[in-house]
Image (spheres, rainbow, N blue to C red):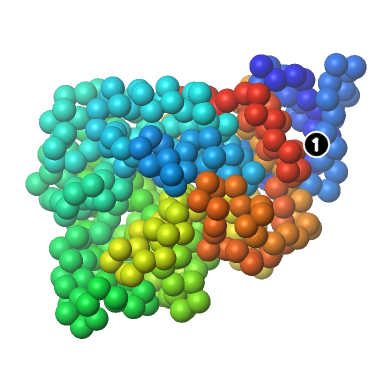
Amino acid sequence: MSQKTLITNVSIVNDGQINVADLSINNGRIEAIGKLIPDENTTVVNGTGKYLLPGIIDGQVHFRDPGLTHKGDLYTESKAAIAGGTTSFIDMPNTFPNVLSLDILNEKYELASKKSLANFGFFLGVNGDNLDEVLSLDTSHLLAVSDDGLYFTKKGNLLADNPETMEKLFANCKSIVAIHSEKEQIVEENEQLYKKQFGEDVPIELHPTIRSEKACYEATKRAITIANKHKTRLHILHLTTEAETHLFRNDIPLKEKNITTEVSVHHLWFSDKDYKKLGTLIKWNPAIKTEKDKNGLLKALLDDRIDLITTDHAPHTLAEKQQPYFKSMSGAPIVQHSVNIMLEFYKQGKISLEKIVEKMCHNPATLYGIANRGFIREGYFADLTMVDLNESWTVNKDNILSKCGWSPLEGTTFQTKITHTFVNGNLVYNNGIFDETAYGMPLEK
């Protein structure tokens, strides 16, 4: 376990407040917060002028391990996450084999315990093929069950396209159900329409027209209707349209919500104007849409209709991305830069530091019931992210840590920098230097 550490004179952002204080770490936990004096066995980190956030919990990533490790793996992508201030992640079930049983889920946890520098959690996959098996389990101890990404394996795996499957699952599932919300039928009809016009080389600018607002909105509305009928705990992953934001509530606290949602950072940062320059590098599913959608998502984030900020980090090789429309893989690496993106919005006056912490730290822990993480509190695990709000740097191939080695943000200059990242009290990242002597821990409820 980690040695004793004292962070001095740092601005702590937590529970809707910012206070300058010292913070001591002992045996992996936050020991005390206040005006503290180090003893001779304590390592001192000077936090003067810097801000200390709870370690970011990214509620949606695709780290590709096992089975797709030419794109990324639990070691490389967790390292990129930690450099970006993310100390915990929840990985989706579309690795190979797909995570469709508890045996495979447990194997993934075991793999992460030997490879991941960050804390880790995993969703159990659910589709029509394993529905009965999932319903036979007590899933209440799981973070969630999800269909996300499973549509890449075969058509018909999206729950949003299968109301009968949703009815059965929503009526009987004992855990959160987290879904990718698009109507595949509408998407396929749009694909065929443009394929007739352009063949295989459909312009990437048509991606948000193919994976349209209608496809998203109708799927989300139907899923919410079924979930409300059964009082299901439903979470809609990576919301992309302004229209959908009006389907969610902000008149009750997060703890009382049965229906929740999130926005991924790229849907706040990019819009359809960026396809001309970046092309398939910003091809994500659901698609990056209009400036109106981008602004509507930020508004809903600020007024609490949207509950979380995630990344949907999904690395592919450049060769897999730089293909004609139908062959280009959807997704991109972004976990290393999510905090910088949100801090850029802070610098622009669009969001407060307290709100960023609420959506990236507090709310993921609250929503998924993660114990002793997501807040800066005495007795909690010392997962901490220190940032300098006045140090600029530029994204380039030399400082990208994802295994795929590229980013749609290359050439972007950020005005803020992550300086220190603590995981379970270990200073894993210190101004570009990593200590890889300890692995992360499983996220527990």
Q: Would you call the spot at circle 1 few (<14 residues within 10 Å), some (14-19), or many (20 or more)?
A: some
Question: Could you say which is closer to the camera, residue 346 or residue 83?
Answer: 83
Write the residue at 62% across / 23% down: 438
Under tag 1, what secondary structure? Answer: strand
* Residue at x 14%, y 41% (from the top left corner): 128
Compared with residue 38, is residue 366 higher up or lower down, i.e. above or below? Answer: below
Q: Horizontal placement of 93 versus 312: left or right?
A: left
Residue 423 coordinates in the image, percent (x, y): 63, 30
Q: Position of residue 196 (x, y in %)?
A: 17, 80
Q: Is residue 438 above or below residue 50?
A: above
Whether residue 405 can be seen here: yes
Q: Is residue 187 left or right of residue 13?
A: left
What residue does disc 1 label? Answer: 21
Name the residue rendered at 27%, 37% in the picture.
98
438 relative to 328, above or below: above
When the figure is inspected, residue 431 is found, relative to residue 119, above or below; the finding is below
Q: Quadrant of residue 99?
A: top left
Residue 340 percent across, percent down from the top left: 63, 56
Residue 248 quadrant: bottom left
User: What is the three-letter code of the residue carrying label 1?
Assistant: Ala
